[in-house]
Structures are given as structure tokens and as C-alpha cells.
Amino acid sequence: MWYSLFSENRDWLVGMGVVSVVMLVGSLILLPVLVLRMRADYLMSGGRAADSFAGRHPVLRWTLLILKNLLGLILLVLGLAMLLGPGQGVLTVLLSLSLLNFPGKRRLEIRLLRLPGVLSTINRLRHRAGHDPVLLPDD
């Protein structure tokens, strides 16, 4: 039974494995860069975090927002597929959520940072690079 399942879907599984390796290497490279580029008060603002596309021409701004969310949606689908098959499914889903714009995203980010060890690991990395620690609201 398992053999026939794997043999019938061999190309799909190999493709997912390749995507998984690319996502793993990419996340190991990009995650520290993104953590260091994040403002220390990123989550402290009363409303939305500063929009990185705010100063752009409206057509370019909307195009970039659509492309960013489209990439996030593609990564979400791939991540969910990797949860069932081979790969870095959880990491890919988390990366996709960081790209997507949706209601409650800020609350979710704060909740994830409050998980044991997450904020301390991020702030340790930031400290080594000479950056201020990430601040969380008291709410």
C-alpha cells in the first residue's frame, strides 16, 4: 500500500523535497536578516506597524502589496502540503503568515513571540549584532 502510494507520487514527493530544502536554506539565511531589520518597537505602535510601501506611488504600492500577499498565499499552500508530505511545513506556514496581510496578524505575532524561548532567542541574536531588544506591549 505505502509503496504504491510513494511510487505513484514520486515526482510530487521529489518536488516537495526540493522545495523543502530551498525553504530550509532560505529561512536559515533570511530569518536572522529579517529579525535584525525589525524595529525594536515594531509591535508597540497603537495601530498598524509602519507600511514599508507607504512612500511609493499608489500603483506601485498596490502592485507590491498584491505580489507580497500572492507569495504568502503560495507559501501557505506549499507549507500545508509539506505538513502532510516531506518538508519544513511549519516553518513555511510561519513564513507565509509573516507575508500575508489579514485581520488579527499583530495579535498573532505578539502571541507567537510570547511562546517560551522565542523572544529570548530573538533578543539574544539582536544583542549579539548590537541591536536593541524587541519590545512587546503589556496588553
Image (spheres, grey):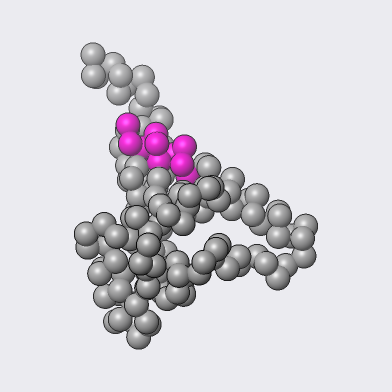
Would you place residue 97 above or below residue 32 in this image?
A: above
Position of 27 compared to 51: left or right? left
- Spot the residue most to the front: 139
The image position of residue 40, as x and y in percent, is 42, 76
Identify the residue at image location x=31%, y=69%. Answer: 122
Check the image and report above or below for 106 versus 75.
Answer: below
Q: What range of the chain is rendered magenta?
A: 75-84
Residue 16 image position (x, y, % from top left): 39, 38
Image location (x, y in percent) of residue 15:
41, 37
**In the rendered image, which quarter is residue 118 located in?**
bottom left
Task: Count every numbered label the image shows and give the total.
Answer: 0
Q: Name the quarter where the N terminus is drawn.
A: top left
* Image quarter of the C terminus: bottom left
**Among all residues in the image, which is located at the extreme bottom?**
130
Residue drawn at x 32%, y 31% is 84
Check residue 80 for magenta coloring: yes
Side of 129 relative to 120 (left or right): right
Instruction: Classify 34 as above or below 5.
Output: below
Q: Mostly what secondary structure, the magenta segment?
A: helix
Q: Where residue 48 sits in the image (x, y, percent)?
A: 55, 62
User: Is residue 105 or residue 86 the one in the foreground?
Assistant: 105
